[in-house]
Image (tube, grey):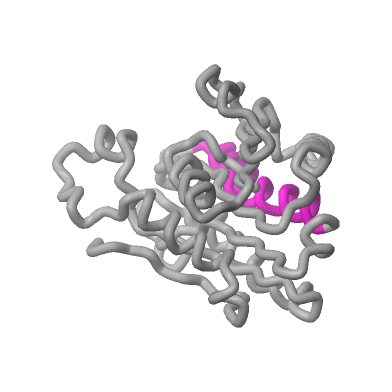
């Protein structure tokens, strides 16, 4: 199950899991586009208009997925956003926004999915953090703080469930090569950025049997950036 599953990275992660043979459900804040809805099957389920900052909506989404696909073995928390603002000139509401979108969504989704994941013999939770969680540049305080929270959630939850056979890890991307980032940074050397597909490959590995001994890790995926 992939939160933020209809964004650039979410779609790449969903495709990678489909190729790996998984049944896939995606959750997104926006409505399900017609093209996505047309793909609905017993192996692919898009669920739209879910506000994951609300626990009741997260639980509804998870119950819908379990009802349609039977269970959840792997949760990937992709949902997130970026906002650049300095502390001096920015709005304090930006800190609340980054907390809600980047951290709270991962908390509510994880809590809602845990009852199903704990029944799995190979349960996985994979959170998307950010390289900025380790070192924040000017104007990235709110974003970096929220992504640092994702790392602390990863560490704490991995300890909480490790004796149940569940692994919890985080992936820390550098700048992701998306149309939005290219538009925002037109003069950047995009060859050093990380393609969404490369991040998706790491996520799928962490969900595999080969990664069964990895938990509580924060894995940087920076490309050449």
Question: With respect to residue 13, does 145 lie above or below?
Answer: below
Q: Position of residue 64 (x, y in %)?
A: 80, 36
Q: Nearer the viewer, residue 159 or 146?
A: 159
Question: With respect to residue 74, does 160 lie above or below?
Answer: below
Q: Is residue 96 visible?
A: no
Residue 92, by quadrant, is: top right
Inspect the magenta stretch and tell me whether residue 98 lies in it.
Answer: yes
Q: Is residue 186 left or right of residue 96?
A: left
Q: Is residue 6 left or right of residue 175?
A: right
Numbered marks: total: 0
Highlighted range, magenta: 91-114
Question: With respect to residue 71, does 210 lie above or below?
Answer: below
Q: Is residue 127 visible?
A: yes
Q: Nearer the viewer, residue 11 or 103?
A: 11
Q: Position of residue 134 (x, y in %)?
A: 44, 68
For the point 18% across and 52% down, which residue is it? 191
Inspect the magenta stretch and tell me whether residue 23 lies in it.
Answer: no
For the point 26% across and 53% down, which residue is it? 193
For the point 28% across and 62% down, which residue is it? 223
For the point 15% across and 50% down, which residue is it? 189
Quadrant position of the C terminus in the picture: bottom left
Residue 155, by quadrant, is: bottom right
Q: Position of residue 165 (x, y in %)?
A: 75, 76
Q: Nearer the viewer, residue 58 or 122?
A: 122
Helix, strand or loop: magenta stretch: helix
Question: With respect to residue 180, does 70 lie above or below?
Answer: below
């Amino acid at each position: 199950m992939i939160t933020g599953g209809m964004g650039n990275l979410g779609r790449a992660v969903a495709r990678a899991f489909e190729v790996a043979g998984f049944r896939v459900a995606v959750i997104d804040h926006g409505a399900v586009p017609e093209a996505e809805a047309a793909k609905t099957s017993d192996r692919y389920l898009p669920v739209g208009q879910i506000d994951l900052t609300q626990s009741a909506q997260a639980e509804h989404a998870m119950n819908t997925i379990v009802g349609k696909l039977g269970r959840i073995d792997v949760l990937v928390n992709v949902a997130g956003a970026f906002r650049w603002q300095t502390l001096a000139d920015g709005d304090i509401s930006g800190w609340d926004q980054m907390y809600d979108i980047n951290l709270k969504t991962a908390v509510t989704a994880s809590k809602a999915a845990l009852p199903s994941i704990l029944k799995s013999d190979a349960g996985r939770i994979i959170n998307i953090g950010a390289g900025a969680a380790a070192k924040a540049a000017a104007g990235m305080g709110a974003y970096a703080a929220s992504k640092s929270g994702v790392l602390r959630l990863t560490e704490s939850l991995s300890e909480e469930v490790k004796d149940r056979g569940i692994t919890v890890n985080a992936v820390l991307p550098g700048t992701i090569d998306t149309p939005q980032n290219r538009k925002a940074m037109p003069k950047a050397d995009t060859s050093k950025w990380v393609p969404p597909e490369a991040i998706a490959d790491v996520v799928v590995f962490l969900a595999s049997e080969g990664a069964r001994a990895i938990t509580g890790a924060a894995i940087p995926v920076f490309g050449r950036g």
